[in-house]
Each structure stands twice: as structure tokens, then as C-alpha cells.
Amino acid sequence: MSRTRRTPRRTAVAALLAVAASTAGVVALNSAANAAPTPAPASVSAEPAVGNPDFGSTGQGAEAPIAEEARGAVYSAATSKISRSTVIERAKSWVGIGLDYDWGGRHGGYRTDCSGFVSMAWDLDSSLTTDTFEPRGVVYSIGKSDLKAGDALLDNDGGASGHVVLFEKWANSDHTKYWGFDFTPSGVHHRVYDYPYYPGYGPYAPVRYKNIVDDATTTPPTPSAGMTDLVSADITGDSVDDVVGVEASTGKLWLYKGYSNGTIAPGASRVEIGSGGWNGMSNLAAADFTGDGKDDIVATQESTGKLYLYPGTGSGLGTRKEIGSGGWNGMHDLIGGDFNGDGKADVVGVERSTGKLWLYKGNGTGAISGGSTRVLIGSGGWNGMHDLVGMDVDNDRRTDVVGAESSSGKLFFYKSNGAGLDTRKEIGSAGWNGMNDLIGGDFTSNAYDDLVGVEKSTGKLYLYPGTGSGLGDRKLIGSGGW
């Protein structure tokens, strides 16, 4: 791992860092030491502790050629070209599939470390290292203002002192934060970074792969995400679910009030319920975890792996409380709901390293069970699903699981039986890979939960009304910018 020192670039092999394998622990709900002063959490820009496995690297393997059959195309250093969108899609293919950081390991022919990951995304013929990208003539320096999708921020030291981050897009208007990808000891991350990387690391410089090319502009590009991590929650306590989401450019949390006719408040009428820092949180999930009749929100702090509960107040969110002491950034697609029918809200999520689906039972007063008492409800393969949703599809007072299958684009319904999940049923035939940020809730005030999601190609928000066994024809409820 490299530490910032405001001197010319240097090469030094840092000591290997101990990477602690965390399980999702639990602390008492009312621990005063863990309370934050406001609902908005600390930003991920705070300097991380030395040895934090979420940042930097612990070393890199030797250069290794890639077999042609493992690559996306036949390689020629002189003529091979790759589009920016292809680089980003290749990078996304390693996110959330449970890869361990191991510079002696391989996935798809590429080394499973920070530079092997970027070599894979650029479809190189070898897994290079941070100190050989430049000497091999693979990259060249560019300015900050030149950065585009598929470029990188490079600390060109070797071994554990070097690291590389793949750039995707700016996350705010003043270009101090950006969306990107990196492979660290805690896994492959797709998240918001401080420019050029987290404080205390580096130095980093923007570079460009020599064979990357801009995408053709014959079709409109996919709109940049305006909102991320959408979640449905009855924040206002009127028995109609509202839409809550993080604004990517500001990190603020916004409430779009829901109405019983299946519509939501327009952007001009939205209400700010989190003042900033929410782009450092992930896996937002909602339910009434405290048993007071008002929905609460739980979220993972990416920089620490802790799980926090933000209690609903009827008009917004109260002071957060830590309910999971660490390891929660090793989970994805968290959803809230009463999955076992005991009248208490639980948390369900996918374990990245195994693809298993776990249930953390709620106690009805704002706490959940720890890793040692969690219940397995899906034995594997859940890394192949995306945008999992908790919703009571059939109105039996138990929360079911709905999710899209990445390989087919189909939407599946997994009925809760109180102890686990029944055999899945297809409720959407194809095209669901074109949707993201799926959320479920009662937006129409009838007997069945509905599904809401963002269409990637347009940024529009659609509602799919629940029918009791599946979904009806969709309805536009957000005209763009989602």
C-alpha cells in the first residue's frame, strides 16, 4: 500500500499488510459511542487507517502472458483497439463475484491483483504491474481535464507501494470526486473516490491506455446516474411507500413522497433528509426495524464495513446507530423486510465471497442477529443475480425476494415460506439487465407490493404494479435524470 509523501515518485516495497477476514458482527443498538451527530454519515474522503484492506494493495505478482482463449480479441500491440464502454463492461464483470486479492491467483487468465485487474479491463496480452505500464509503452500521461471512461489513476511504484484505479466518470461538478474501480485486499470495488485517490495514498497521476478509443456516437450515450441506491420506505407514515435515493453528484439523501395512485413527488418537491456523505454509504435497505410504525433505513459505510441504522422520525431520519461492527462491505444487495413472518423486520444479503444468501433476524427493537447466528436461505449462485428486491408479492405478510438474472436478463420471484425460499418463478421474460436500482413497495395502496426501477438507457423511472402473482404493465413515474 502506498502512502502519500509530497516528494518525487519513488519505488519501495512496503511491508505486507494483514488483511482481516471480517464477518458481519453486531453491537448494541443504543451504544452512545457509536452515535453520529447527524443522519448524514462521515464522507469516505476521511483519511483511512493504515492497513485498511479497502484501500491500496498488498503486492503484485510477476508479469504473466495471457492465453489467447482467455482474451476478448486477438491481440496486436500495433492494431488492437478497445472502446471505452467495453473497458467499463469488462471492469464490471469482476465486481461482486467474490474474487480474493491474490497476486499468485488467476481469473480468466489474469492475475487477481490491482494491476492484473486493470490489465484485464484493457484486454492486454499480459498481466502487467504498476511499475511496468509506462516502461512498456502501454500508457501515456494525460491531464486531469482529459480524463474519460477507461482511463486510470496510476501510482507507478512497484509491489505493495504501487496501485492503480480505473476511472469511469466524475461524481460531482467540481471534479473532486469520481466513480471508478479498483481491486484491493477486500475485493473489487465500484465506488466514488476522492480525486486522485483517498488522502494518505499516492502520488497518483492520470494516464491513458494507448489503444483505447472513444465510442461511436451514432446512438445516444446512457445518461449518467442522477440518483443511486434507491430504496422504498414509508418515511412519512401514511401507509404509502416513498422513494428515497442518493444524489450521485452531491452525496445528499432525498425523499420523493409517494402517493396512493402510484405516482411520486416531482424533483421540485423532493425533501432533503441527509445533508451529505451518502455516496460513502451503500446497500441501502428499509423496513420498520425499531417497531415504532415508521420505516427506518440501514446502510453500509464502505470505508469501514460497518452497518448503521437511521431511525425514521415521520419526517426524516434520526441520529444513526451502529448495528453491525464490520465486514458488511463483504455483502451486497441488502434488502429489508419480514422474511420469516414473525412481525419483526430482518435483513437479507448476498455474501460476495461465496454467492450465498443470508438472513439476519431482527429483534423488533432495532438490532439484528450477528454473523454466528445468521440463517442460510440461498446456498449459492446469488452473485449471478442483480438488484435484489424485498417485496410481498402475494400478500401473505412475508417478504419475498425478487431479482434479475445477469446471464439471461430475466426477472425471478422467490417466495418466502417462513423458513427459507421456495423454487423460483419467472415473472419477467427478458430485458431486465436494462434496468437498475430496482425497489419494491406498496406504491398503489392495494393488496400487493409493486416494483419500481430505472431504465438505464433513458434515466426514466418506471412503476410495475403488483398483481398478486407477478407484475402488470409498467407506468412512467419519473421522466428522466434518475
Image (spheres, rainbow, N blue to C red):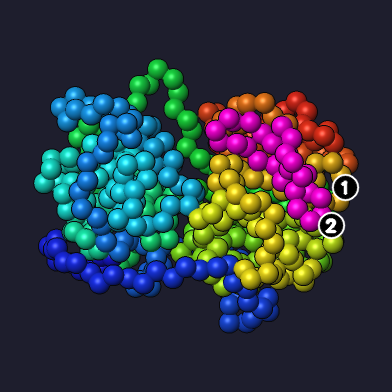
Residue that carries the numbered disc 1 in the rendered image: 396
Residue that carries the numbered disc 2 in the rendered image: 341
Q: Amino acid at mark 1?
A: Asp
Where residue 83 sits, quadrant-wise, is top left
Q: What residue appears at the point 39 percent right and 65 percent down from the top-left corner?
A: 53
The CA distance from mark 1 to mark 2 is 9 Å
User: Residue 214: where, in percent of width, then height?
Assistant: 31, 28
Q: Name the quarter where the N terminus is drawn.
A: bottom left
Q: What residue appears at the point 85 percent right and 61 percent down from the top-left corner?
A: 343
Q: Amino acid at mark 2?
A: Gly
User: Residue 400: where, in percent of width, then height?
Assistant: 76, 47
- Which residues make up the magenta segment? 400-426
Q: Residues within 10 Å of mark 2 (few under 14, many from 20)?
A: some
Query: Are dots 1 and 2 in contact, CB under 8 Å?
Result: yes
User: Residue 427: where, in percent of width, then height?
Assistant: 73, 31
> Is-magenta flag for residue 479?
no
Q: Earlier in the sequence, mark 1 or mark 2?
A: 2
User: Residue 139: where, in percent of width, then height?
Assistant: 18, 41
Q: Nearer the viewer, residue 40 or 29?
A: 29
> In this image, 8 relative to 299: left or right?
left
Q: Is residue 422 above or below residue 358?
A: above
